[in-house]
Image (cartoon, rainbow, N blue to C red):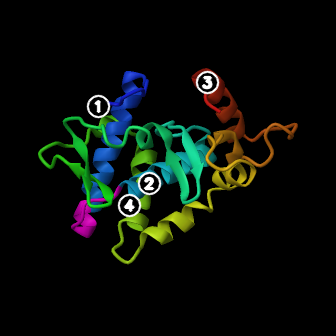
């Protein structure tokens, strides 16, 4: 993927591009429309923040900006008009940027656990519904407590994954998920 200034470990890059391909193909299959970037951004955020809450680590590990319409992955947003690879492309059409998958390519599911695939399918069912409008997805992303905490303090700043948890670091005894998150975040140098 041509990503401008994005620096990613190769494995993370493969997880991300296969996750985007999964989303774009599943969204199209369900709606018969190519997803706009906003739907992708919310899918990635819902998956990452729910995964942190349930397991202590994100699936994609992207940095998210607390924008007015919800969390937005900084790496993709900053490079949205220059993202190209052999699995999908971002195409500007009218006032939107659409994600067009290469239908001859298959998602490499070896990069994902069964839990992650189940999480993807859960969010596809919610997001890829022709009755769900852009404003609905945007409003529902405001329920991500890490977005809310960040946006209320300082709009348009980076969301910290630790804000998924209400009691870190004030709590004396951590839950296993919180403990795992602290270890994961220190190893991977994420907030």
The reply to whether the C-beta atoms of the residues labelled 4 and 2 are less than 8 Å apart is yes
Residue 67: % across, % down: 57, 52
Measure how far apart labels 4 and 2 are at the Cα level. 8 Å
Residue toward you, 187 or 71: 71
Residue 124 numbered tag: 4
Residue 35 is inside the magenta segment: yes
Residue at point 58%, 58% (across, down)? 68
Left or right of 114 on screen, residue 149: right
Q: Which residue is mark 1?
A: 1
Residue toward you, 33 or 96: 96
- Closer to the chain start, of discs 4 and 1, is 1
Q: Which residues are magenta?
A: 28-36
Q: Which residue is mark 2?
A: 43
Alpha-carbon neighbours of circle 2 within 10 Å: few (<14), some, or many (≥20)? many
Alpha-carbon neighbours of circle 3 within 10 Å: few (<14), some, or many (≥20)? few
Q: Which residue is mark 3?
A: 189
- Closer to the chain start, of discs 3 and 2, is 2
Alpha-carbon neighbours of circle 1 within 10 Å: few (<14), some, or many (≥20)? some
Q: Nearer the viewer, mark 3 or mark 4?
A: 3
């Amino acid at each position: 993927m041509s990503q401008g200034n994005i620096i990613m470990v190769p494995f993370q890059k493969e997880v991300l591009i296969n996750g985007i391909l999964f989303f774009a193909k599943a969204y199209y299959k369900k709606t018969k429309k190519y997803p706009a970037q906003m739907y992708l951004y919310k899918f990635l955020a819902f998956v990452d923040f729910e995964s942190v809450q349930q397991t202590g680590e994100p699936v994609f590990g992207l940095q998210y900006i607390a924008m007015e319409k919800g969390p937005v992955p900084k790496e993709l947003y900053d490079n949205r008009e220059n993202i190209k690879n052999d699995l999908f492309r971002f195409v500007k059409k009218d006032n939107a940027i659409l994600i067009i998958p290469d239908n001859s390519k298959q998602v490499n599911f070896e990069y994902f656990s069964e839990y992650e695939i189940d999480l993807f399918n859960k969010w596809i069912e919610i997001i890829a519904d022709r009755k769900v409008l852009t404003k609905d997805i945007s409003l529902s992303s405001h329920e991500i407590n890490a977005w809310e905490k960040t946006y209320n303090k300082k709009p348009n700043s980076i969301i910290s994954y630790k804000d998924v948890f209400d009691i870190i670091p004030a709590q004396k005894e951590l839950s296993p998920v919180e403990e795992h998150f602290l270890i994961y975040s220190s190893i991977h140098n994420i907030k």
